[in-house]
């Protein structure tokens, strides 16, 4: 169903008649914003985060945390409903004609009952394995859109593929999915699984949460999942 540093502005010029600041002089003007801890929204969540288990020995990185599936990313201090943890190569910042990145991303979704939206203008459905499947599917699309598409066509492609991913996620028992059993904290757990030309997506459950995952270049048949004991492992870049 993948997501960091702000630019620092220049200091304002001095007042007329004031000599220019020389090298080493203190910078005056607007105070720079305090850096945001990327772990803060993860640590504020009220559910455990899952990633690949110890069988994965490669690179780990932070994805994005969100409040309400399909809603805006969660800001520091806000409650989280879902988020992702990445493994392997990070998403490319620019489209690549021949994308050879290898990655697997685990999406953790909190179990939530139906409730009012944050702005109180509607109702959010209860989360389910379909929620995890949709977030994983949309994450795969965002990470692997074809490099030969120009920006004018990208949105049309994303809209078309996102609608397809939504329909598939809403029918996990349908012919678009197959069954796959994978370990979660060492115990076998059933998942729903599908492949496409862009990669693979799966969805299932874990203690206290719903799990989705997507990847490419990393075999889904060889991964396992576990609760993350120390998120700092994902902070190191």
Image (cartoon, rainbow, N blue to C red):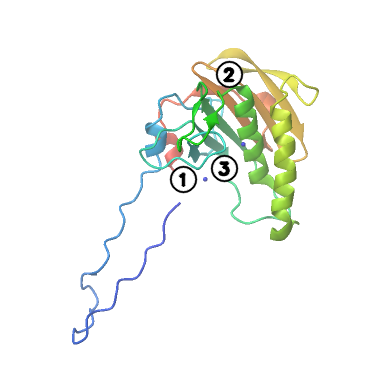
How far across and down, in percent of the image, does residue 81 sit?
48, 30
Q: Residues within 10 Å of mark 1 (few under 14, many from 20)?
A: few
Q: Which is closer to the viewer, label 2 or label 1? A: 2
Residue 100: tell me if it is visible. Answer: no
Instruction: Identify whether 82 is placed above or below 16.
Output: above
Q: CA distance from mark 1 to mark 3?
A: 15 Å
Q: Which residue is mark 1?
A: 237
How far across and down, in percent of the image, does residue 229 sit?
41, 25
Q: Residue at x 62, y 36 (%)?
A: 1
As drawn, is 236 to the left or to the right of 155?
Answer: left
Q: Residue at x 67, y 42 (%)?
A: 141
The residue nearer to you, when weighing 48 against 118, is 118
Instruction: Identify whether 34 is placed above or below 205.
Output: below
Q: Which residue is mark 2?
A: 205
Q: Which is closer to the viewer, label 1 or label 3? A: 3
Q: Residue at x 41, y 57 (%)?
A: 6
The extreme right residue here reads 175
How far across and down, in percent of the image, does residue 82 sit?
50, 32
SS of the residue under disc 2: strand
The residue nearer to you, when weighing 68 against 211, is 68
* Residue 2: numbered disc: 3
Q: Residues within 10 Å of mark 2 (few under 14, many from 20)?
A: some
Q: How many marks?
A: 3
SS of the residue under disc 3: loop
Q: Residues within 10 Å of mark 3 (few under 14, many from 20)?
A: many
Q: CA distance from mark 2 to mark 1?
A: 28 Å
SS of the residue under disc 1: loop
Instruction: Of the two numbered discs 1 and 3 on the same chain, state the one appearing first in sequence.
Output: 3
Instruction: Of the two numbered discs 3 and 2 on the same chain, state the one appearing first in sequence.
Output: 3
């Amino acid at each position: 169903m993948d997501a960091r540093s702000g630019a620092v502005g220049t200091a304002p010029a001095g007042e007329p008649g004031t000599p220019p600041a020389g090298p080493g002089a203190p910078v005056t003007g607007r105070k720079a914003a305090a850096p945001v801890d990327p772990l803060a929204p993860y640590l504020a969540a009220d559910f455990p985060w899952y990633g690949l288990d110890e069988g994965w020995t490669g690179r780990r990185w932070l994805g994005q945390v969100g409040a309400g599936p399909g809603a805006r990313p969660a800001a520091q201090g806000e409650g989280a409903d879902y988020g992702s943890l990445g493994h392997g190569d990070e998403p490319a910042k620019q489209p690549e004609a021949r994308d050879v990145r290898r990655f697997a991303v685990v999406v953790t979704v909190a179990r939530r009952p139906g409730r009012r939206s944050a702005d109180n203008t509607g109702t959010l459905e209860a989360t389910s394995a379909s929620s995890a499947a949709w977030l994983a599917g949309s994450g795969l699309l965002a990470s692997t859109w074809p490099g030969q598409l120009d920006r004018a066509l990208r949105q049309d492609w994303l809209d078309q593929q996102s609608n397809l991913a939504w329909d598939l996620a809403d029918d996990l028992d349908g012919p678009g999915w197959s069954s796959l059993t994978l370990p979660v904290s060492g115990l076998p757990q059933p998942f729903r699984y599908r492949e496409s030309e862009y990669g693979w997506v799966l969805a299932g459950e874990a203690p206290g949460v719903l799990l989705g995952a997507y990847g490419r270049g990393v075999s889904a048949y060889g991964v396992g999942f576990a609760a993350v004991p120390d998120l700092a492992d994902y902070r190191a870049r």
